[in-house]
Image (cartoon, helix red, strand yellow):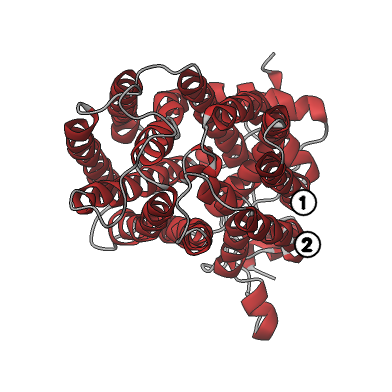
Amino acid sequence: MSTAEEEKAQGCGSDTSSANRVEIYDRPRGWRGVYYHTATQVCLVGFVCFMCPGMFNALTGLGGGGQINATSSANANAALYATFAFFAFFSGSVHNVVGPKVCLMLGTWGYSLYIASYLATNINPHTGDFVVVSGAILGVCAALVWTAQGSLMMAYPTEAEKGTYIGYFWGIFNLGGVVGSTVAFASNYNSTANGVSNGTYIVFLVLSFTGVILPLFLADPYKMIRTDGTRVTPIRHPSWKTEFISLFVALRTDPWIVLLFPMFFSSNYFYTWQFNDYNGALFNIRTRGLNNFVYWTAQIFGSFFIGHYILDSRRLRRRARAFLGWSIVVASVFAVHIWAYMYQKNYTRASEPPDGPKMDMHDPQYPSRVWLMISYGLLDSMWQTTAYWLMGAMSNDPAKLAVFTGFYKCFQSAGSAVVWRLDAVQKPFMDIFISTWVLAAAGMICAFPLVYKRVKDHTEIDDEALLNRPNVEKIP
């Protein structure tokens, strides 16, 4: 028992001293020490997302879900992100009542259903409506998965480890996209068609079923002790009513989070142009598989670079790291989009019909195009890692972080629903590209005041509690 616990047991510690004292616990040893290590658990969550969202990313990255006609896929993604946006607003509260393990177990099966719908469409082209319905169901499931993932990934590391742990997770998660892309590339290497084979979908389906089982092996998060000896803060919310009130409490007690909403909104918006309107529009299926492979591989390096070497650098104060990370992402947004514009101005939907001839990996103009995909992969991973790191810098409380993650996924999915629908109704490629560029730039600019005013060198005690503050429960 720590000194603080002894004082509490003896009744000799004042409310003020106990409030400000941090209790230090001994971490378990042996195999229990490995299993209950926070890095192990974050990596296990990464493997859950490797098998389910990772396979989803590999499928989406092929453009049109690997289909010749991308309309059904675009409509399915619009439905997916619309339901995701709605349920993500409440998923943080659901998580705080049922716990992360249940959220992950309930959520992962939706990915298997979604992949199965593409297999059904490949067998019978008249089942496009099944893909759309599966997308809507997956939106509900994905809200649960990503809220649980975000809360654990941000709550387990110490303040000095948050960027590194996000890099661990993002690397493992994106390895799922790498593996899925490798499967698609290898199984369709000799194909002259513009769509993937049934075998590709079957492999994706088997891997996603594995992800449904993995949450069973997660530890209870409130038995976890961080590497500095502090315990993960337990959540003590008495009712569903209190949980839903916590949404508005989080906004009232930490209104700076609103400045991240534009960044949240645009954080998946750019996928539509990258995957459907660039990769899907210009390249044949085996080249799309190769592009997908290098894209998700680049994500592994990008997340680890900015997470470990920038946001967790021991040579800089946390505020300096925040400004440096923000600057790198802003510079990358403009550099990559200027480069992409040089290609986008040369083609339209009319010039690139779905069943027309496509660029192959052996064509002489291909190398510069694939480097753009690599650059987009780096940008995406740095963007997502920075967004999670900024939320993690605002608090260490899992309840609060679950609500923040719910906001993140809500606005992220709203943006995705909008742009996937625009793509489904055949809006010009250039219009979608320009909106992508503008929203990405605006999201980072709006985040700057939060970086300046809200990111501190250390998280304060007042940032920890969500509902255990004076007068908070009196908020109507």
Task: Identify the residue at image location x=20%, y=26%.
Answer: 345
* N-terminal-most mark, 2 or 1: 1
Asked if disc 2 and disc 1 are in contact, CB closer than 8 Å, the reply is yes
Left or right, 343 with respect to 2, comes to: left
Q: Can residue 460 be seen in this view?
A: no
Find the distance from the CA under tag 2 to the CA under tag 1: 8 Å
Residue 373: percent from left, percent from top: 31, 47
> Is 152 situated above or below 31?
above
> 108 and 342: which one is in front?
342
Between 21 and 241, the one nearer to me in the picture: 241
Query: Residue, x 29% and y 63% (percent of image)?
Result: 314
What x and y, as percent, mark residue 169? 50, 58
Q: Is residue 459 left or right of residue 233?
A: left
Q: What element carries label 2?
A: helix
The image quadrant of residue 258 is top left
Q: Tell me if mark 2 has few (under 14), some (14-19) or many (20+) residues whose alpha carbon lies within 10 angstroms of its own.
A: few
**Residue designated by label 2:** 216
Amino acid type at image mark 1: Met
Which residue position holds label 1?
105
Kind of residue at badge 2 = Leu
